[in-house]
Image: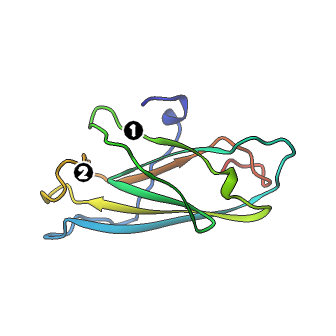
Amino acid sequence: MASSWTKTAQWIWTPKYREEDNQPGRYFLFRKSFQWTALAGQGEVPIHVSADSRYRLFVNGQRASFGPCKSYAERWHYETVDILPFMKEGENVISARVLRYSSVEAGSSSIVRTELPGLVVHSETEVSSGRGV
């Protein structure tokens, strides 16, 4: 699914990653904390998220989403999630647990994966620091 944010968002991954022999899948953890000042009448805080291969997204320790839905190499999908119900005034933490299926092992072959794994989480919501989530 293409959207305007996909042109500017940056995929991230762990430094010095390499595919391990005989290891069909590995978990990686990511987290980002930010300050939040609630705005009166704020209806939602949408974020977009995807990963290669699978992810579980948490906000302040509560599961907010999982995915992505089945994608194709030519068309990668993402989920849009309203995280406002999981947020609180002050410091908040977004974390993701990503399961990376190896591109060189045959395990779970129905899930598309690329040679370079990644996680993308994007929002254009302003936070109290003046920067996006």
* Sequence-first disc among 1 and 2: 1
The type of residue carrying mark 1 is His
The residue at the point 33 percent across, 32 percent down is: 75
The picture places residue 107, in percent across and down from the top left corner, at: 16, 59
The picture places residue 44, in percent across and down from the top left corner, at: 70, 43
What is the secondary structure assignment of the residue under circle 1?
A: loop
- Specify the label residue 115 is tagged with: 2
The type of residue carrying mark 2 is Glu
Residue under pointer 1: 77
Foreground: 119 or 43? 43
Q: Answer whether labels 1 and 2 touch (C-beta < 8 Å).
A: no
Left of 46 or right of it: where is 58? Answer: left
Quadrant position of residue 108: bottom left
What is the secondary structure assignment of the residue under circle 2?
A: loop
Question: Mark 1, residues whose alpha carbon is within 10 Å: few (<14), some, or many (≥20)?
Answer: some
| Visual colour scheme | rainbow
Left of 93 or right of it: where is 80? Answer: left
